[in-house]
Structures are given as C-alpha cells and as structure tokens.
Image (tube, rainbow, N blue to C red):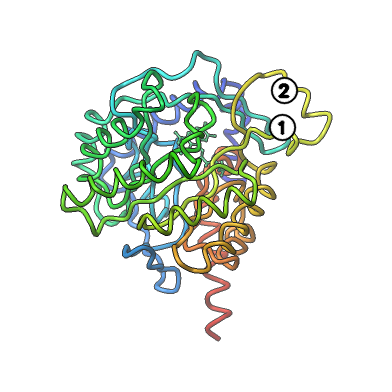
C-alpha cells in the first residue's frame, strides 16, 4: 500500500472540502521544495494534439486545481497537462457548504460547488509564474448572477485575462451547478457564443491557441449530432467530454437513495464511466475525425484510458479516481500505457 492508501482512512474522516483544503495547504508547501522530481516521459507516451505537444496523454480535469496553485506538484507527479478552473471573470464564493460528498464504496463524488472562483484577475496573476514543461489549460465559466443572455460578455472577460497565460482555453457550458449554464449547449445559443469567442481570439492575436468546448454527458444523441455540427462549423479546435451527470440512474440501488438524499449536484467517478463512454463514442462518430476530443468522465485505470484513446480520443483527463486512488494512479496509468506502447513496437 502506498502513502496515500495508508493515509486515506484519516483523510476521509474529514469532509471532502476540508480534506481538499488540507491537501492543498500541504501541496503548496511541497511546491516550494527545490527538489521536486522532473519526470522524464518516454517518447512513446508523447502525444501531439491540437497543435500542442503533451509528454503523456494523461491530464487533470478542471475543478480540482481551480486557481492553478499546485502546478509544479502536478508536473512532478507526472501529469502531461492540467486544466485549471473553472475560472469566472469576477470572484464568487460558489454554493453554500456542504457542497461535495464522496461515496468511497462506489468511487462516486457528488458536487454542487457552483464555480467557487478567485476570479480571473487573481488566477491570471498567479499563472504568470507557472512552471515550464506542463501544458496548462484555462477552463472558463460565467458568474452566477450574470443573466444567460449576457454569458458571452463573461466568457470574453475571463478569456481576456486567462488566455494570454495558458496554452489552451476550454469553455465550460456543461456544469450542472450554475443555473441555466447548460442551455448554452443548445445550437442556437452555442453559435453566437463560439463566434464571439473566436472573434475575440483573433482580436487578441491568439488564432493559433486552441479553444475547446466542454460538454455534458446528459445530451441526447440527436442533440450531440447538432452540437458537433455547430462546433465543427464554428472553427473551434476541439471538444472535451464529459462533465458530471445529473442522471441519478447511473447509481445502483440501494446507494441511489443515499445519493438522492444529499440533494442537487453532478455525479462523477466510476458510476459515470459507462455513460461518459457512450456519449464520447456518439460524439466521435459524429465528428468523423474533424476535431480532436479529450476524454473525461469515470476514467480510473490504464484500461479505461487505453480504451478511451483506442476509441479515438486524443487525450484523457482524470479527477474523481485521483481522490479515491491517490497520486500514484498517475504513474500507474503512465506505466501501463508505456507497457502497451513497448508491446506495440516489438
Ligand atoms: C468536486 C468537483 C468539482 C468540479 N469542478 C469543475 C469545474 O469547475 N469545471 C469543470 O469543467 N468541471 C468540473 N468538474 C468536473 C470534472 O472536470 C470532470 O469533468 C468530471 O468530474 C468527470 O470526471 P471524473 O469522473 O474523472 O471525475 C468537477 C468535478 C468535481 C468532482
């Protein structure tokens, strides 16, 4: 058992957000350590996606390091990219606590964080000192009080500050915890949003910087087809699928009742796996290779990541599995992918 495995019972005695804050407190101290390892990823793991080079296809999904405070540590742990955020243009506290719940037996997390964010200005200032050799994405959202009709203004405000200090940006229109946000996935709302963002990207001279769109797993196949066509026609760079699900049906009884008793929020981790995979396959079929896709949702082993890449995803992201399995998961997945790469070569 590794150190995290040994400490896990203690860590899980704290409520998830307190545990998160303690881990980040310790992590920030570790980041100041001058002897953090510099993992050398074998060339066989390298990936090129949307014009960027990744030392490994495995990255951190948005929401864990919202403010980009632990970037040196993520790099030392062996991740190839980190998606910071969601960052909102202005600071906001998010929803009242408690707002995160873990169900370790099922590898499940329920969250209704609601974009707690320090705001784009503070995060951008921090990112100016980011480590080299790690791809950093900036996941952007709107403030809660901003009406849906003015969402574009919010995404643009956040983009102006964050885009210059990251390698790619991702528009989060799929969090279930900001009222109305998911309506922005509807083609008639998506078209002007993407056009407005691409205009700004051009204005800022960042045409070569990838702009991605992160989608929910709760979209029907026909909606997915329409969204894919809007995304391809718009000229954005790629898609991320998926965010958390609102579907309580992914949780088996009797756990479902306990999950429902915790109230609103999105589900992630093992119970999301099959649904996210189905949605990704549907998107990949509709895409026909026209845009790259980043896989996310329920990935927690080499097999899961390998499967997502074999399906056609360019990269893979983890979140919930890292909470349950600890940071050694990253090395295990990389080593597993490596073994496969060697087998393919020989
Ligand atoms: C506590 C928590 C907070 C999250 N916050 C965000 C967020 O701010 N922005 C975002 O795009 N996704 C957010 N997510 C969703 C994850 O990025 C990811 O899409 C989702 O959890 C599915 O991946 P997983 O099953 O590996 O956790 C959050 C997930 C969790 C569990």
Residue 107, quarter of picture: top right
The quarter of the image holding the C terminus is: bottom right
- Asked if ligand 1 lies within 8 A of label 1, the reply is no
* Residue found 52% across the figure and 14% down from its top: 97
Numbered label attached to residue 294:
none
Is residue 240 shown above or below 91?
below
Q: CA distance from mark 1 to mark 2?
A: 7 Å
* Residue found 80% across the figure and 36% down from its top: 252
In the visual, does 110 lie left or right of 253?
Answer: left
- Mark 1 burial class by Cα count in 10 Å: few <14, some 14-19, many 20+: some
Q: Position of residue 144 (x, y in %)?
A: 41, 21
Q: Position of residue 104 (x, y in %)?
A: 68, 33
* Residue found 57% across the figure and 57% down from its top: 283
Q: Position of residue 23 (x, y in %)?
A: 45, 30
Numbered label attached to residue 248:
1
* Residue found 40% across the figure and 58% down from its top: 233
Residue 218, quarter of picture: top right
SS at mark 2 in the image: helix
Q: Are marks 1 and 2 in contact (CB under 8 Å)?
A: yes
Numbered label attached to residue 260:
2
Q: Position of residue 113 (x, y in %)?
A: 49, 24
Residue 119, quarter of picture: top left
Is residue 117 shown above or below 331?
above
- Mark 2 burial class by Cα count in 10 Å: few <14, some 14-19, many 20+: few
Nearest the camera: 292 or 42?
Answer: 292
Is residue 125 shown above or below 203?
above
Nearest the camera: 98 or 16?
Answer: 98
Nearest the camera: 133 or 137?
Answer: 137
């Amino acid at each position: 058992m590794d150190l995290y495995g040994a400490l896990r019972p203690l860590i899980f005695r704290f409520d998830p957000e307190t545990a998160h804050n303690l881990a980040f407190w310790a992590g920030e101290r570790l980041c100041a350590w001058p002897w953090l390892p510099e993992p050398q990823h074998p060339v066989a793991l390298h990936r090129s996606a949307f014009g960027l080079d990744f030392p490994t296809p495995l990255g951190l999904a948005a929401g864990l390091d919202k403010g980009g405070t632990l970037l040196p540590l993520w790099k030392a742990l062996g991740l190839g990219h980190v998606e910071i955020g969601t960052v909102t243009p202005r600071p906001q506290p998010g929803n009242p606590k408690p707002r995160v719940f873990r169900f370790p037996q099922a590898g499940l997390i329920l969250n209704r964080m609601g974009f707690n964010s320090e705001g784009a200005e503070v995060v951008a200032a921090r990112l100016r000192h980011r480590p080299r050799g790690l791809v950093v994405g900036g996941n952007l959202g709107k403030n809660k009080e901003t009406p849906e009709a003015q969402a574009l203004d919010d995404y643009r405000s956040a983009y102006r500050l964050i885009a210059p200090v990251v390698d790619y940006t991702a528009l989060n229109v799929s969090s279930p915890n900001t009222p109305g946000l998911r309506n922005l996935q509807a083609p008639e709302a998506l078209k002007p949003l993407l056009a407005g963002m691409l205009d700004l990207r051009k204005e800022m001279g960042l045409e070569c910087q990838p702009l991605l769109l992160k989608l929910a797993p709760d979209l029907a196949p026909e909606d997915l087809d329409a969204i894919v066509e809007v995304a391809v026609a718009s000229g954005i760079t790629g898609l991320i699928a998926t965010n958390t699900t609102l579907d309580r049906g992914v949780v088996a009884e009797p756990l479902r009742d306990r999950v429902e008793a915790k109230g609103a929020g999105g589900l992630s981790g093992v119970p999301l796996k099959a649904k996210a995979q189905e949605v990704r396959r549907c998107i990949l079929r509709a895409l026909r290779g026209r845009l790259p896709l980043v896989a996310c949702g329920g990935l927690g082993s080499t097999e899961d990541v390998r499967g997502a890449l074999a399906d056609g995803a360019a990269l893979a992201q983890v979140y919930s599995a890292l909470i349950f399995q600890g940071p050694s998961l990253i090395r295990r997945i990389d080593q597993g992918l490596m073994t496969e790469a060697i087998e393919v070569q020989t």
